[in-house]
Amino acid sequence: MFPSTGPEHRLVADPPEPLATDDFVLAPLRPELLDLDTEAYLASPDVIRDHSCGRWPVAGFGSDDNLPLVIRHWSDHQAKRAFTYLFLDPEGTSSLGCLYVQPLFPYLEAMGADARTLLRYAGGSTARVSYWLRQDRDPELTASVAERLDEWLRTKWPLDAYLYRAAPEEECTVYALDRLPLDRVVIDLPAEQHSYLWWAADVRIVS
């Protein structure tokens, strides 16, 4: 649903198998899942508005508008530049939201991070992670998603580090991330127009 990375960046060579739990399963967002993605988006205008800091939803948005975005995400996924997943119910019949695992470093460069920040996250596979969950489902899903997602990222992904990003308005997500063994960090990004919150999970990063 949001802009993807450029062609010159690849995040990891071998992403793990998608996560599957009793509460949800992850599936790479591909064109065959267009209708499920669009339906979840249209069911969650408040969540999407908070997640995008007011940029979405767009009036009249539908499957025809969503298709080129889904194709772009799927192209990035196949090229291993960035990875977008749907949270599906265990039966795979309904989308519960969307997960984005994208390279962090090019974003930091584009947003004007200082040399110390760029050096810290250079030279490895470091991800920027964000997600949203649809607003018409059980709120308890938020805690389950945060816990299982973090375990999957920490133990299965070949990453040097990953940082979660959330808008302050995403109160349920912020609360769930604050309960995890993560460090709240402040990143100065002069070109970023939105005041995002950040949580760092250092896996193998060099200090």
Image (cartoon, rainbow, N blue to C red):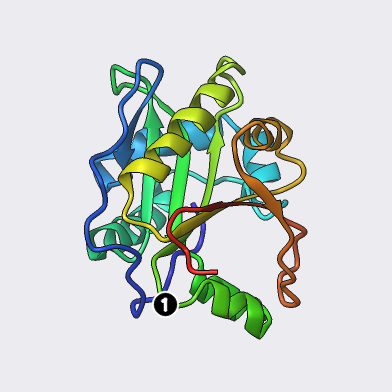
Q: Mark 1 = which residue?
A: 123
On screen, 28 above or below 161? above
Relative to 73, is 197 on the left or the right? right
Q: Nearer the viewer, residue 189 or 91?
A: 189
Q: Residues within 10 Å of mark 1 (few under 14, many from 20)?
A: few
Tell me the quarter of the picture where residue 21 sits: top left
Quarter of the figure that contains the C terminus: bottom right
Q: In the image, what residue type sits under mark 1?
A: Gly
What is the secondary structure assignment of the residue under circle 1? loop
At a point 61% along the width and 26% down the height, the residue shown is 135
Q: Position of residue 57 (x, y in %)?
A: 62, 46
Look at the image and tell me whether residue 197 can be seen: no
Q: Position of residue 99 (x, y in %)?
A: 45, 43
At a point 62% along the width and 18% down the height, the residue shown is 139
On screen, 165 above or below 28? below
Q: Position of residue 171 (x, y in %)?
A: 74, 34
